[in-house]
Image (cartoon, rainbow, N blue to C red):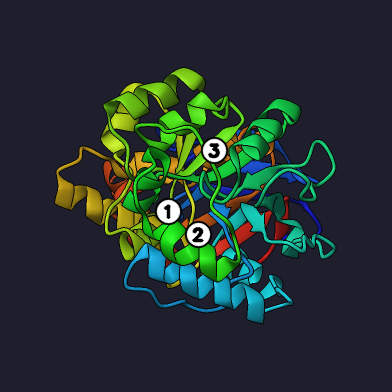
Amino acid sequence: MAPTGRGELESKWLLQRWDLPPREGVSLAWEGDSIGSIGFRPTPYPSVIIPSFVNTHVHPDFTHLIPGHSLIEWIKHVVKFRRQEKAHQVTPQEESMVHRGTAAWGSILARPWNVETPPPHQATRVAFHEVLGDMGVPLPPPGLPLSPHSPYALTPRLLEAIWRERKDSLKAIHLAESRDEVAFVQGKPNALEAEVFPLAGRNTFSRPKARTPVEYLESLGCLDSTTLAVHAIFLDERDVEILARRGVSVILCPRSNLYLSRSMAPLPLLREAGVPTALGTDGLGSTPSLSLWEEMRALWFYSRSMGWDLSPQEILAMATHRGAEVLGLEGLRGLEEGREASFLVIRLPGNLHPRELALFVLLQGDLHIEAFYIKGKRVF
């Protein structure tokens, strides 16, 4: 194998995207960080080349699990964590993602924002700068992705200003994550104002009332094609219709959602409405690892328990090219000529039928990784 960003591989199968059928008998050549050509070359060696993973939402500064019997209790512990942990070392967490086949991620940077260190192994980090508070708080330079934390963490004036003045910037916002958030936008008593605000030194603020968090953001003009709604658990059909009409994308973090909210976004409703969906791991503060393999399997088993008609291919798509589309990473939208040469090589059982390929990769692919390349260079 060439370690310098130039080479060629043969494989029995190639998955260019998980919404396309596999190609049989291929040679994949690359020059520098891009795929140069994909040719036909029959080979008996049982392996498959698949796209690398894209973790659409991660908090890399969390280093360990933060306990919490509910989301509110967890947030209260996070407030204390932020006060105690002044330096946020993200490199070990990013390394752990790379060594599980992830080539790009949407990283939420808590203040003080620090993006001085490049991501490991030439991976791609899309850095979302977290914003909380009211008008007058520091904002990153124009053009950079933002993470206005949530409907309850920013005043309406600041939310409106961000969407009005940063029209072209991606914006990731935690949305509809708890029933207390629903009560908050309805103007009803809630634990966010009663317990979290005093602990964080925040004052309550006036705001328009709304039926749901989605309708609250719509009333402020904060839903459009640059909006990434993270979690989006407590939605109904009206909310989903609004998200679809406004061009919003939704990011699911299944294990974190089940841990903190005991539920998950209504994926069948989102799929039926055509809302783009992708997968994230959240951070080590609320999930056992930053592995998208484990995230996909959590979604797979949960969907089966709920009776959802969700195929392995759809889940794998959410962790690969759909994540790339949500983050605007054109080079990772599929293994095609001219796109980024970032891919995994997985060894297959000799008698595996193509119809079984996606399920095998989903459930056991990480146990059979032979190689991982990022931008044409072998990572392992």
Work out whether mark 3 precedes mark 1 in sequence or the reverse, and give the earlier one.
3
- Indicate the position of residue 208 as horizontal and vertical percent values: 48, 32
- Up the image or down, 276 lies above or below 264; here it is above
Q: What's the CA distance linking mark 3 and mark 1?
A: 13 Å
Q: Are the residues flagged by discs 3 and 1 in contact, CB closer than 8 Å?
A: no
Task: Tell me, yes or no, if residue 21 can be seen here.
Answer: yes
Check disc 1: other Cα within 10 Å, few if <14, some if 14-19, many if 20+. many
- Indicate the position of residue 299 as horizontal and vertical percent values: 31, 52
The one of 189 and 276 positioned closer to us in this rendering: 189
Residue 283 located left or right of residue 184:
right
Secondary structure under badge 1?
A: loop
* Amino acid type, label 3: Leu
Mark identifier at residue 228: 3
Q: What's the CA distance linking mark 2 and mark 1?
A: 6 Å
Q: What's the CA distance linking mark 3 and mark 2?
A: 14 Å
- Up the image or down, 246 lies above or below 188; here it is above
According to the picture, the residue beneath numbered tag 2 turns out to be: 282
Furthest-bottom residue in this view? 84
Mark identifier at residue 253: 1
* Amino acid type, label 1: Cys
* Amino acid type, label 2: Asp
Q: Are the residues flagged by discs 3 and 2 in contact, CB closer than 8 Å?
A: no
Work out whether mark 3 precedes mark 2 in sequence or the reverse, and give the earlier one.
3
Name the quadrant containing residue 114. Answer: bottom right
Q: Are the residues flagged by discs 2 and 1 in contact, CB closer than 8 Å?
A: yes
Residue 224 located left or right of residue 313:
right
Residue at screen point 78% across, 46% down: 136
Check disc 2: other Cα within 10 Å, few if <14, some if 14-19, many if 20+. many
Residue at screen point 42% across, 40% down: 185
The one of 29 and 216 positioned closer to us in this rendering: 216
Task: Tell me, yes or no, if residue 283 can be seen here.
Answer: no
Secondary structure under badge 2?
A: loop
